[in-house]
Structure formats: C-alpha cells, structure tokens
Amino acid sequence: MSSPHTRPIRRLLVANRGEIAVRILHAARELPEPVETFALYTSDDRSHCDLGRPQHTIQISSASSYLDISFLVEQAQKHSIDAVHPGYGFLSESAEFAHRMWHEAGSLVIGPGWENLARTGDKLQAKQLAQQCGIPVLEAMSQPTTSVDEARAFATQVGFPVMIKAVDGGGGRGIRLVREELELDNSIQRAIGESPSRTVFVEKAAVDGFHHVEIQIIGDGTGRVRHLWERDCSAQRRFQKVVECAPALVRDRTLVGRVIESALRMASEICYRSLGTFEFLVSEQRGEFYFLEVNPRLQVEHTITEAISGIDLVQTQLLLAQGYTLHQLGLGAEANASHPPPNVFSIQLRLCAEDPSNGFALSIGKVTGFSVPSGHGIRVDTHVNVSGPALVVGSNFDNLLAKIIVTAPTWEASVRKAQRVLADSRIDGVKTNINLLRGIVAHPDFMAGKVDTQWLGLNLDAVLQQGENISKTLRELDDPARPSQQAVSQSGLPASNLLFRKGDAWSITLEPLSKDSQQSDKVAHHLRLSRVLRNEFPTSLAAEIEYTTPTSQGAVPYRMQIETTTTAASALVSSSHRRGDPKNPHHIILPLSGKLIEILVADGEDVAENQVLAFIKQMKMELEVRSPRSGRVKWVYEMEDEEEDVAEGMLLVELEPNNGNVEVRGKL
C-alpha cells in the first residue's frame, strides 16, 4: 500500500443506488484493466443492479445500511474489497468513512482522501481555506452554534438577509434564507434538524442578481490541478438545483476566469486529489464574486461537464485512485480559464417524482411508464428499468428518476433541443416535475440567459402555469385513447398512494360461490400484516400475514371481500391511519407523503390558523404542515414510532369549532 489514497483496484464496491450506481458500474466495466464489481440493494430497490449489471450483489436490510459505516467495513473485509465508490450523497463526504475503511478493511474510498474531506466537507473550514488564499468570502460566524441567541446577535450585527447553514449540509438540506428577524428562530431549528452534526452557522446573504457558479476541479494529489470549466446552477428552488448548464450564463469571461483561478489556487494549496467542485456566487452587474463551499466528491451535474469536455469523470476518478497522474491521463495542459470550450453548450434537467403544484410534495407510487427520446445530443441517466420490474418510488430514497442531458453547438440550440425532448417525454404512474421543466426551458428569460438564484422562486407560479399550458396542448395532440398520465382511485387520490403498514388489519367475509354448497353461513376470518415486504398496491402487495379463522374449512371456492377495520377481533391490532375527507372542513389532511417525525398538538388544544401542527421529512428535508383554519383538536393521529411512513391524504387532525380567536403559539 504505497499511498493511503491510491492502490490497484481489482474489486470495487459501489456504496450507492439509483442512477449514479448505474453510472459508476458502467464506468468500472469500461476500465482498461478488468474490475470485479459489487453492488448493494434493498428488497424493494434493485433496478440499479439490473441496469448496471455488477458481477456480485449484496442485499441489505434497509436504506439505513447505506449510512452504516461498521456494516460497510464488514462487507469490505468479507469480500476482500479493494475500493469503495460512494457516489454522491450517503457517505460520500464522510472523512470517518474514508479513514475507517482504509485502516480497518484496507479498502480505498474513491475521492480526495480523509484529510481533504475533513478540511473541505466542513463549510467553515473551507471558508477559512479561501480566506488564507485571499479569495473573497461572505462574512460569517467563525464557530458553529446551536444557540438562537448567538445566531440572532450575529445576524443583527451584519444585517439581514442572512443564511442559516448546516456545517455539514448538502443538496439544499440544512440551508435557510432569513430576510427578517421573525423568521430566525424557526429557521435555525429546521436547519439544525437537517444537519447530521446538529450544528449551524450564520452567513451574510448575497441573493439578488447572483449566479451560482461551480468550478469542476481535478487533481492528482501532487499539487497539480486543472479545471474542466464551470457550470451554472442558478435555476434552483429552496437551494435545490433543478436545471444546470455548462458553461455558465455569465457573459463576462474575464470575471469567470478570475473565479476559476480562485478555485485552482485553493485546490493547489491543499494538493487536491480526485474530483472536487468549488462553488461561488457571481454577480456580473457588480463584477464581484464570493466563495461558498467545496463539494469534495462527484456532483449530480457532472454530466454536463463531461458533455463540454469530452472527459469521463467517473472513470477518471477510478484511474486517479490507482495512482495515475494528470499527465498520464492526458490532462496536463491547462485550458485558458477566460475562454469556454468552443461551440458546445449542455443542459441537465432533473426529472423528479414530485408534485410542484402541491408544494413539491413527494409522489409515492410505481412508475408504470417511462419514455424519454434518444438521439443526437441527448443523454439520459436513469435507474428506471423499462424492461424489468416497475420502479417503486418511496420515502426512503431520493426522488430523482432521471437526468436528461442535451448538448448542442449554441446555447439557443441546446434550449430548443431541451424543449423538444421534454415535449416528447412521457412518465406514467407517479406525478413528476415535467411541467416545471417544460415551463423553465420555454421561458424567454431562460433563453436569454437571465436566470439568477432568485429567478425560479420569484417566477414559480408563472413558470408552472406556462408548463401546464404546454402539457395541456401536448395532451390534446396525443391519441385520445392513450391512458391518463396518472392512475387515480375513486377517492381522487393516486391509487398507488394507499399506504399499507405493519399492524394494519382487516375483517374478511367468505361467502360460498357454489349454490349447492353445504356451507350456508358466512364465515368471519381475520388478517393482520406482520411485515410489509413490497407495496405496489393495487397491482401487487407482498407481505407476511397472520391469518386466523374460527373453523377449519375444506377446499370450497369463495368470494372474498376485504374492508379496513378500526377494531380487530382475536386480539389483533388495527392501524390508526384514517383517510381524510377533503370536503370535510374539520379534517386537516396530510398534503404530502413522507416520514412523519413530530406532531406538535394534542387532544383538546386550541390551534390558530396557519399554526404548525407537524413536521414531515422528505429525503432529509423537514417540511411543515400548517393548519388552514383555527379550532380545537377533537382527534389527532398518535405516532407509534419516532418516524413513521405516512401517505398523502391521511387524516392528521380533526378539529371542532372553538368559541374565540386563538393566537398563534408554539413553533411557527
């Protein structure tokens, strides 16, 4: 083992799932020297294995296993793994994971190494590095905190707006923009809840007229680094990227060149190895920029850098991990930072299972149809396996279905190609953000490149309406006999959103079909779910069931009717989930699916209009459920576990009128 960050790779474990696991497995199979690949999967999420085709698969018990360092170390030891690729998300920025994997299993984690992970994965340490290199940063607290008083004092000192940031957040999690002091307390609490370390810091915000520009850096650990140009990620909502493009939509290439040179300076200072993304806020009008953070890993949007540079970034990662230098990889000559790559523009569109018209609520269900066109300048990275079992979207994993990447010689041509590809795409079974994507790429501001970090939030309603109008026109042009894009139950809710849980119970009546049967009486039986294995209701449901019957019956054909019960016979326990009635003004219904993590009210309490009643987690983001009206709590759902899967449409609270006005109290 020559270097703690390089070694020959013969056996590679992909410690991730979804489209990025497919991407890594494909890149590994194309390496000059053969590599034996291993992949992880859960019983209800293995499409990445079917598409990526690893030589070996390892079934894990739950989604949490992807974050279980001890378990992954044990698997590396058991299977003599040489290297682990964590992709992005999960443990990709964990210095502890990289350190333990090497020292306990002798396995290399693909990436910059634990020293650089510790220094760059922590946002405050990364800001200190930027300051040491003479790079402008926004004023921020020097130490993380959990104190609202400390945060308020700093915010008052620098002036609003400010950003609340988790020290170790990512993917938009743990970030809150606060424009006035009244929002501060709740923003800090929510950011802390989304931070793995439960620590945050406050930073002066630069939000108006700024582009989010990130520089793709690659290094070989010797101090030699080079850039692969930049990406513009300004089309974002609540700090989550929706559409990205490369190169940036900043016309002043001299300014962009200064940003790229700043990223190179930081990377060279720490002898950066592997891929890293150095992120900045850039204002063309003011001619200024500020360093934000480093993502010391592969990025979701690496695809558009590959499109404009012609370099396979994942395969390059794997080769650098085996000791290759930039020169050996043909990357020794630095490109001029002030000049973009000639005649190439690329756009990435993130297609997600969510409902933008309903607060971007996660759409849980089964993908029953998936069609995205192919052709010149079109790339689709996905884990939706159209020729295998249907993909089931749940609350345990990220809701990204596919990344659609289009590339053309000019910006205008790439936008037109994006418009055409989205118009020809069809996804059935779950709601998606395709209307939003169609609205973005059709907007005149997007074609003109006038999109800053606040643009989508300020124009969301108009963009969504434009996208819905486009989709309506497309549906009218489609074959009228084509099935609806969303299977809907008689209740008006997606049938696939009906949620079965451990403990649900039914009473069952069996009635003989044969008229000459000796059995004349109906027989009562009872079923109780003891373990849900796969939930694709109404198409299929795999579960372990406890079955009881008062008598033993012969092989007589029966008609079976199943009805949910609120009380269970034979000491069986039923679920307390109740479907809310949207027409009942006293029902407060969950507007989205996810994991219910906290309920803030109890029976008999008075609540005010707009009061926060509960928090739901979707992909590590904590979202509020507020009361649409005032009243007194007549009934409230009782949680049985610390976190519970809940479905859109479930009754959360039942109110009865109170006699007076109620002031908003509690957590707002």
Image: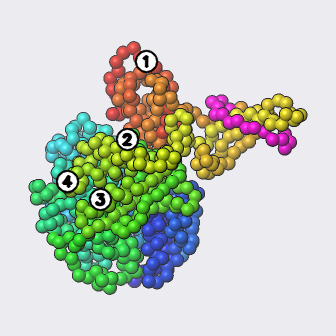
Q: Is residue 230 above or below residue 656?
A: below
Q: Is residue 567 magenta?
A: yes
Earlier along the polypeptide chain: callout 3 or callout 4? 3
Task: In the displayed orientation, state which residue is furthest to the top.
Answer: 659
Q: How far is the residue under mark 1 from the one under mark 3? A: 54 Å
Q: How far is the residue under mark 3 from the one under mark 2? A: 25 Å
Q: Magenta residues, as a range?
A: 552-568
Find disc 1 in the rendering and name its residue: 657
Residue 460 picture location, percent across and down: 29, 44
Amino acid at circle 4? Lys
Find disc 3 in the rendering and name its residue: 416
Q: State which mark lies toward you, 1 or 2.
A: 2
User: Of helix, strand and loop, which one carries label 2?
Assistant: helix
Point 24% across, 66% down: residue: 410
**Viewed as shown, does residue 126 lie left or right of 15?**
left
Mark number, residue 357: 2
Mark number, residue 450: 4
Judging depth in this view, the residue of 62 and 482 nearest the camera is 482
Q: Is residue 225 above or below residue 95?
A: below
Amino acid at circle 1? Pro
